[in-house]
Image (cartoon, grey):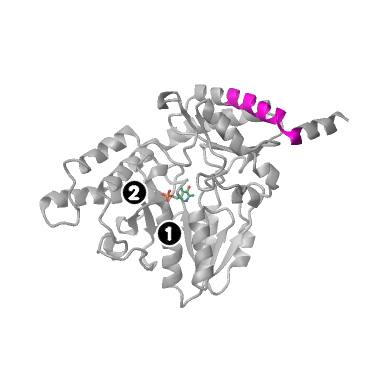
Amino acid sequence: MDNTQMIYLDNAATTKVRPEVFEAMRPYLEEQYGNPSSAYAFAGRIAQKVDESRQTIAAFLGAKPQEIYFTGGGSESDNWTLKGIAEMYASKGRHIITTKIEHHAILHTAEYLEKKRGCEVTYLDVDENGMIDLKELEAAIRPDTILISVMFANNEIGTIEPVKEIGRIAHEHGVLFHTDAVQAFGHVAINVDELNIDLLSASGHKLNAPKGVGFLYVRTGVRIEPLIHGGAQERGKRAGTTNAAGIIAFGKAVELAAAEMEQRAAHEQKLRDHLISRVMAEIPYTRLNGHPTERLTNNANFCFRFIEGESLLLMLDRVGICGSSGSACTSGSLDPSHVLLAIGLPHEIAHGSLRLTLSEETTQEEIDYTVDKLKVIVDRLRSMSPLYEDFVKKQGK
Ligand SMILES: *Cc1c(COP(=O)(O)O)cnc(C)c1O
């Protein structure tokens, strides 16, 4: 199956670099290849373009350019936040609050800090829609709490957390608030002041820029230890030769997102709602995971009872449809998604999950083709499932 016939519904895993973005970065790989930290004018022009990207991104968030630190991606920004804040504020305390549904870049870092750095971490539960409870959050805050890290929107089920309220509670208790906004950035309007955010992670490749570039927003006055030591790049906070082409691409992607966000969200939401209503109406014993309304406009996540998500993905692949069983990071492992378990699904149901995430390019024809194929495939897999056979027998009695 070549790319032209492929239906790509895995935009939460990564996105295509848009042609405008590629064209914006191309000169900085070809003619303008200098190191922006060098002294000659050839490099200075590139440094200027990097700063324009920084300004574009800062303006988009209602932040100041000097509060944006470019990194190698979302995972680095998440690692940096937890490790850098834990070290810097160790004399104030060692307690961190996060949730059970974070990306592994947060969860595994938190576990590392518990095991190796003497931190204590509270992992908040979520309800059946994937929402945290604000009262539970407030009750978890202790005098030694230094950081609350709650994702903006979940990468598997799309649920959008009550970020503004979380930030308000954090600040009432003098605690810093970080949000992993990798899935939300560029898709949802974010103003760091209005939403009480102190630190925010984002990644280029989830928003039509290339892989390997991201940033961490750090509010003025928040102190953070560097994660990567070396040169004086990023005002001494993040060493490593500036990824000029990647940063310029990211700036272009944000410029496009700023101009098209509402239109794009409306397009995706219309198709996503069509997808959800067709699947729920036409495929029995199906559950929609994630919050019914407070969710990313491009995310649909289903559990089909009596079938294996992995077999479903393989059969979809054969008819040219790229989906995911939850997150790209857990595929290959036999454990069901930690997010689906956290919303209270039993193992056997969590195993039958399918995440479909749309883009600005997704069409109604693609969605209809996908649902048509999905119906047939789910039927086929169920007809081979002993669990389904037992179930039908019991129903028949
Ligand atoms: C993809 C993702 C990350 C990791 O970002 P990378 O740039 O791939 O390292 C972190 N958090 C969330 C919510 C994500 O979806």
Asked where in the image residue 278 lies, by quadrant, the reply is: top right
Crowd class of label 1 (few under 14; some 14 to 19; many from 20; radius 10 Å): many
Residue drawn at the location 67% of the way across and 48% of the way down: 128
Residue drawn at the location 54% of the way across and 74% of the way down: 144
What is the magenta range? 371-388
Asked where in the image residue 262 lies, by quadrant, the reply is: top left
Amino acid beneath label 1: Leu
Image side of residue 289 versus residue 192, left or right: right
Between 32 and 271, the one lying in front of the other is 32
Residue 277: give x, y in percent of width and height. 62, 29
The quarter of the image holding the C terminus is top right
Q: Which residue is mark 1?
A: 199
Does the segment drawn in magenta span residue 295?
Answer: no
Disc 2 on helix, strand or loop? Answer: helix
Q: Which residue is mark 2?
A: 57
Residue drawn at the location 44% of the way across and 66% of the way down: 83
Residue 241: give x, y in percent of width and height. 25, 56
Disc 1 on helix, strand or loop? Answer: strand
Q: Residue furthest right?
A: 397
> Looking at the picture, does residue 1 appear above or below residue 64?
above
Residue drawn at the location 61% of the way across and 49% of the way down: 335
Amino acid beneath label 2: Ile
Q: CA distance from mark 1 to mark 2?
A: 14 Å
Between 269 and 276, the one lying in front of the other is 276
Tell me which secondary structure the magenta stretch mostly adopts. Answer: helix
Asked where in the image residue 370 lies, by quadrant, the reply is: top right
Q: Are marks 1 and 2 in contact (CB under 8 Å)?
A: no
Residue 257: give x, y in percent of width and height. 38, 39
Between 195 and 356, the one lying in front of the other is 356
